[in-house]
Image: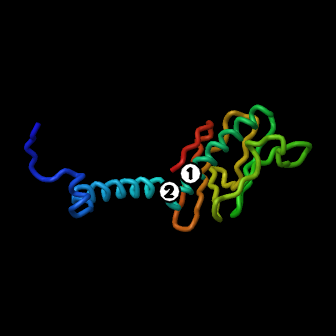
Amino acid sequence: MPTLAIGRSTADRRVGGQAGFTLLELLLACLIVGIVAATISFAIPGRGSHLAFEADRLARLLSLAREEALLRSAPVRFDGDLDGFRFLVWRDRRWQTPDDEPVLRARLWEAPTRISIERVDGSTVVEFGREPLDLPFRMRLQREQASAVIESDGLGTFTVR
């Protein structure tokens, strides 16, 4: 049965004609590559977001340390420096690292981080006791050009700014 066809089929084009991509196919390929590149670039966080992530993690650990002090009925203290931080528990009349508690273990910062602590009473020590009410404090983390602040209201709420 005869058919009327205008132009050549793709089989005819590849055999006898020029082979290649159409402009539409090239534009579609560029669009897909652009979307993949944008997705990857947004998935890789910058330096400032790393500090925000670590501040959020520290705020959660401070909340757990506060609860641990209430459960153990023993004071828990935060100790931090440029390299990292840890929590200490008051046992046998001295501050000790709780080896049996993985949540309170020592941790390293991703990069050197300065810590400054401001409390209402002027002290620069964060310590949770047996009482459910603590003194409010503000802990500032600084690294290169980025900074983050952890604030405690003294009632167990820790917010990161």
Q: Report the front residue among 101 and 152.
A: 101
Q: In this view, does 77 lie above or below 67?
A: below
Residue name at image x 22 percent, y 52 percent: 10
Question: How far across and down, in percent of the image, does residue 124 sit?
Answer: 69, 56
Q: Is residue 110 above or below residue 95?
A: below
Question: How far across and down, in percent of the image, does residue 58 sit?
Answer: 63, 48
Dot 2 amino acid type? Pro
Q: In the current view of this chain or complex, which residue is farthest to the top?
A: 71
Residue name at image x 51 percent, y 59 percent: 48
Query: Callout 1: few (<14), some (14-19), or many (20+) C-alpha neighbours within 10 Å?
Result: some
Q: Is mark 1 on a helix, strand or loop?
A: helix
Q: In the image, is 111 to the left or to the right of 22?
A: right
Asked whether the residues under the numbered discs 1 and 2 touch, taking CB atoms below 8 Å apart as contact, a structural biologist would say yes
Question: How far across and down, in percent of the image, does residue 94 sit?
Answer: 88, 48
Q: Which mark is residue 106?
A: none
**Viewer-nearest of labels 1 and 2?**
2
Residue name at image x 45 percent, y 55 percent: 40
Which badge, 1 or 2, is on the more N-terminal residue?
2
Q: How far apart are marks 1 and 2 (CA)?
A: 10 Å
Total numbered labels placed on residues in the image = 2
Q: Which mark is residue 53?
A: 1
Question: How far across and down, in percent of the image, does residue 42 sit?
Answer: 43, 55
- The quadrant of the rendering that contains the N terminus is top left
Q: Quadrant of residue 38?
A: bottom left
Dot 1 amino acid type? Phe
Residue on which the image places disc 2: 45
Q: Report the front residue among 50 and 113.
A: 50
Q: In the current view of this chain or complex, which residue is farthest to the right?
A: 92
Q: In this view, does 72 lie above or below 30?
A: above
Q: In the image, is 92 to the left or to the right of 148?
A: right
